[in-house]
Amino acid sequence: MNYLEIKKKLEAAKQELEMKLQDQAAPESEKGALQKRIENYEYMIELTDMNHFERGNIIS
């Protein structure tokens, strides 16, 4: 998989969770778990971007 494919899949998964979070029928405990999963996807997307653009390298 290339960068764009991975990022697209991560964004889609995050968006699906955000839609579930907007569901008014979801219990409050589930909403907390969904929010944590959304944050995890945001972190994975950030890491994917960093890896693609090589911003994680140490410059000396």
Image (cartoon, rainbow, N blue to C red):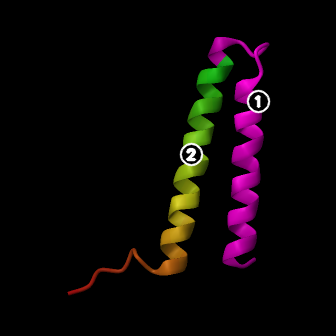
Name, please, the residue furthest toward the bottom.
60
Q: Which mark is residue 20?
A: 1
Decide whether residue 25 is among the magenta residues. Answer: yes
Q: Judge by depth and name the residue closer to the eye, 13 or 23.
A: 23
Q: Quadrant of residue 25?
A: top right
Q: How many marks?
A: 2
Q: Which mark is residue 40?
A: 2
* Earlier residue among tags 1 and 2: 1
- The dominant secondary structure in magenta is helix
Q: Residue at x 51, y 74 (%)?
A: 51
Q: Amino acid at mark 2?
A: Asn
What stretch of residues is rendered in magenta?
Answer: 1-29
Q: Amino acid at mark 1?
A: Lys
Q: Residue at x 70, y 55 (%)?
A: 11
Decide whether residue 45 is among the magenta residues. Answer: no
Crowding around mark 1 (Cα neighbors within 10 Å: few <14, some 14 to 19, many 20+) is some
Q: Quadrant of the N terminus?
A: bottom right
Secondary structure under tag 2 reads helix
Report the side of 37 relative to 18 (left or right). left
Q: Quadrant of residue 10?
A: bottom right
Please determine whether, in this image, residue 43 is positioned above or below residue 29.
below
Measured Cα–Cα span from mark 1 to mark 2: 15 Å
Please determine whether, in this image, residue 27 is positioned above or below residue 9.
above
Q: Quadrant of the C terminus?
A: bottom left
Q: Position of residue 27 (x, y in %)?
A: 71, 12
Q: Which mark is residue 31?
A: none
